[in-house]
Image (cartoon, rainbow, N blue to C red):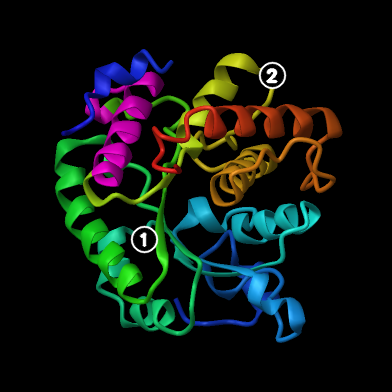
């Protein structure tokens, strides 16, 4: 059964070396290893391997590496990899042989699926999103990995061309990801939902850059905290890695992420 969007109110590509990738992040995107690898030592079998498929919401401020460093500070060895180019949609990822080859290249623990920011917010966009999400999820599961949807945040001022303010756009995005999550039995990392809660509880924390779309360092850190709680089913509270965010703000973001993810695990398909 589809999630009623209104009910959510109640709950409220070329591969490059890392150095070259970081230089190009803001301009074009990133494809290739981001952050530490698991290695081949005795502890490699306990390593969590995560492939991120997304776009600028994933590569701005290097979310995969931020997550990896946060996880390591919590005692979780991880390896992350990423394919993300500006404006890339799930349909483009699903049609890319590079993506499919990367999915099949090794035994991932999770493959994160992030749709373009506007697409989940309209009926027309979801008509493109859902077939691609189904195809990618099937490819990921065929590779014996777990798909994990990345619920994104709305634009700071919503989507005026669709008649949506921030709240309306976020409700549509939340509903879009929850519907496909429930249909496929695939978990979702509720970054956008948690973002909305932080916006309400701590309006002094700037989560958007001046463009009203892309994340600040605090926004990316919040996303990393949500992924930490979603992947490890543990709160990131009191972890030492703060990702360039002030200690005070990092503590607040850690607490918010731990609370909204773990207190609502069943809503996000996290068990």
SS at mark 2? loop
Q: Quadrant of residue 36?
A: bottom right
Residue 173 colored in magenta in the image: yes
Classify 94 as above or below 165.
below
Q: Does the image show residue 170?
A: yes
Q: Residue at x 38, y 56 (%)?
A: 87
Cα–Cα gap, marks 1 and 2: 31 Å
Number of the label disc, if any, that sits on residue 96: none
**Mark 1 or mark 2: which comes first in sequence?**
1
Magenta: main secondary structure equals: helix
Q: Position of residue 144 (x, y in %)?
A: 38, 73
Packing grade of label 2 (10 A; few <14, some 14-19, many >=20) is few
Residue 171 colored in magenta in the image: yes
Q: Residue at x 75, y 35 (%)?
A: 237
Is residue 62 shown left or right of residue 155? right
Q: Position of residue 68 (x, y in %)?
A: 68, 60
Number of the label disc, if any, that sits on residue 88: 1
Number of the label disc, if any, that sits on residue 204: 2
Q: Position of residue 58 (x, y in %)?
A: 52, 55
Q: Does the image show residue 52?
A: no
Q: Position of residue 21 (x, y in %)?
A: 62, 73
Find the magenta span and give its range: 161-182
The quadrant the N terminus occupies is: top left
């Amino acid at each position: 059964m589809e999630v009623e969007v209104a009910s959510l109110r109640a709950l409220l590509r070329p591969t490059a070396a890392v150095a070259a990738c970081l230089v190009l992040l803001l301009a074009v995107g990133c494809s290739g290893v981001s952050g530490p690898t698991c290695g081949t030592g005795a502890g490699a079998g306990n390593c969590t391997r995560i492939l991120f498929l997304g776009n600028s919401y994933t590569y701005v401020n290097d979310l995969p590496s931020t997550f990896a460093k946060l996880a390591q500070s919590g005692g979780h060895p991880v390896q992350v990899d990423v394919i993300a180019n500006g404006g890339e949609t799930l349909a483009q990822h699903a049609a890319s042989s590079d993506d499919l080859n990367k999915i099949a290249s090794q035994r991932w623990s999770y493959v994160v699926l992030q749709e373009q920011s506007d697409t989940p917010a309209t009926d027309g966009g979801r008509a493109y999103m859902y077939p691609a999400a189904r195809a990618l999820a099937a490819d990921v599961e065929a590779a014996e990995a777990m798909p994990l949807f990345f619920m994104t945040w709305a634009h700071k001022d919503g989507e005026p061309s669709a008649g949506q303010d921030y709240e309306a756009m976020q409700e549509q995005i939340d509903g879009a990801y929850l519907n496909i999550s429930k249909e496929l039995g695939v978990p979702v990392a509720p970054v956008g939902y948690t973002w909305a809660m932080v916006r309400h509880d701590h309006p002094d924390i700037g989560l958007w850059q001046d463009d009203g779309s892309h994340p600040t360092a605090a926004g990316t850190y919040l996303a990393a905290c949500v992924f930490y709680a979603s992947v490890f089913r543990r709160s990131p509270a009191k972890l030492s890695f703060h990702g360039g965010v002030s200690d005070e703000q990092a503590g607040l973001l850690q607490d918010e992420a731990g609370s909204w993810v773990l207190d609502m695990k069943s809503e996000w398909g996290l068990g």
